[in-house]
């Protein structure tokens, strides 16, 4: 990541580019923040506008959510080039934004209003390359330490050779993977361009898939959810499911404790068990409900999602998958996500 001084210059330059000529902008680094934040003062005529800005890196939704979770007092988010999804999220959460492409949308209580759309700008690869489930599987394999070759991805995930090749090629087009000139063939390996960008791109795509997934709500009685999974539910799942994994807050407590308690346990199971809600409820020792659930069950997004560690007999989702799920929930879960990312190696490990 660039130094604080460099980022302050980036914030100032982006602000100047979005404002009329002659407007003076002063940017000073904010103290005691775990994410890059800056006090910005805009001198326009005899008026003066002050606000707190934050730097969200590349500008993916995960970048924006990570910033605002760590610094909720930020008024305006700056980034290299905010994605459409990130802009929509910021507008929905009533925060302004400015990026280095020249786009801006800011409306402050001081009376400062900036609405600008750059006339010409390079369209990000995300607008032309959409993430697929096979891309998520390939990305999770890379995050788990699988070398980004067609053969290795095919072997690890079980997806076809053609789907593996296509998934890697699409991630290369997104700028997440790089292949040296002259290297071709199913055994040729790509390399991860930037680990943070890879995780951010994956997390944003995983959140999109999560929103489209069906959820089965289960209610059951227990004194301690983790103890129940260790002594009763886990063994029952081992007997009845080929693959399962706990994710979300419960998984984060076992991987990198941050939150003190679990209200709802998020669980992934294989497609066969998920397809039979009554059997699923019986295995979990509960019943299907419309509300008041203590367990939320989803089908495993990919075969790799369940490849996390086993802690106290509880199968956990891949740490990067846990991170993405926590971010998708937001709020205190997003805070746990940031702690997890700082504490645990999410990958890529290759």
Image (cartoon, rainbow, N blue to C red):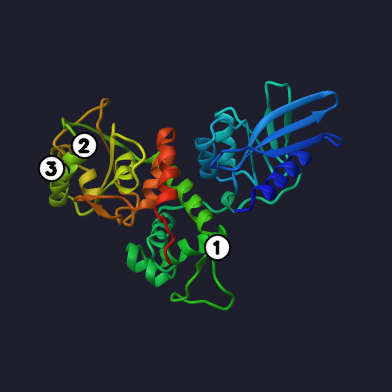
Q: Is residue 162 above or below residue 269?
A: below
Q: CA distance from mark 3 to mark 1?
A: 43 Å
Q: Dot 2 surroundings within 10 Å: few (below 14), some, or many (20 or more)?
A: some
The x and y percentages for residue 136 are 42, 54
Which of marks 1 and 3 precedes in the sequence?
1
Q: Nearer the viewer, mark 1 or mark 2?
A: 2
Q: Dot 3 surroundings within 10 Å: few (below 14), some, or many (20 or more)?
A: some
- Number of residue marks: 3
Residue 328 visible in the displayed image = no
Q: Secondary structure at mark 2?
A: helix
Which of marks 2 and 1 precedes in the sequence?
1
The residue that label 1 is drawn on is 193
The residue that label 2 is drawn on is 225
Residue occupying image coordinates x 75% and y 47%? 120
Q: Is residue 220 above or below residue 29?
A: above
Q: CA distance from mark 2 to mark 3?
A: 10 Å
Residue 243 visible in the displayed image = yes
The residue that label 3 is drawn on is 232
Q: Is residue 56 left or right of residue 337?
A: right
The residue at the far front in this view is: 32
Q: Secondary structure at mark 3?
A: helix
């Amino acid at each position: 990541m660039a130094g604080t001084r460099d980022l302050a210059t980036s914030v100032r330059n982006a602000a100047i580019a979005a404002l009329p000529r002659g407007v003076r902008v002063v940017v000073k680094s904010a103290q005691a923040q775990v994410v890059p934040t800056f006090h910005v003062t805009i001198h326009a005529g005899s008026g003066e506008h002050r606000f707190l800005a934050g730097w969200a890196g590349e500008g993916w939704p995960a970048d924006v959510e990570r910033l605002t979770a760590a610094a909720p007092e930020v008024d305006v988010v700056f980034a290299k080039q905010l994605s459409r999804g990130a802009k929509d999220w910021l507008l929905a959460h009533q925060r302004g934004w400015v990026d280095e492409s020249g786009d801006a949308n800011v409306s402050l209580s001081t009376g400062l209003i900036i609405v600008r759309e750059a006339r010409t700008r390079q369209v990000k690869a995300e607008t032309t390359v959409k993430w697929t489930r096979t891309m998520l599987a390939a990305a999770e394999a890379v995050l788990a330490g699988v070398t980004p070759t067609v053969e290795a991805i095919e072997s690890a995930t079980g997806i076809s050779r053609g789907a593996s090749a296509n998934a890697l090629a699409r991630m290369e087009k997104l700028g997440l993977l790089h292949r040296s000139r002259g290297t071709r063939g199913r055994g040729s390996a790509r390399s991860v361009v930037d680990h943070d960008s890879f995780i951010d791109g994956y997390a944003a795509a995983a959140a999109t898939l999560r929103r489209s997934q069906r959820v089965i709500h289960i209610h059951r009685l227990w004194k301690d959810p983790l103890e129940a999974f260790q002594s009763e539910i886990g063994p029952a799942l081992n007997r009845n499911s080929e693959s399962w994994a706990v994710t979300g807050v419960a998984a984060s407590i076992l991987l990198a404790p941050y939150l003190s308690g679990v209200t709802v346990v998020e669980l992934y199971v294989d497609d066969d068990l998920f397809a039979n809600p009554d059997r699923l409820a019986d295995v979990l020792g509960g019943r299907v409900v419309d509300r008041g659930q203590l367990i939320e069950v989803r089908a495993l997004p990919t075969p790799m999602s369940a490849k996390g560690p086993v802690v106290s007999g509880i199968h956990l989702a891949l740490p990067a998958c846990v991170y993405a799920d926590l971010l998708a929930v937001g709020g205190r879960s997003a805070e746990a996500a940031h702690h997890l990312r700082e504490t645990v190696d999410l990958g890529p490990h290759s």
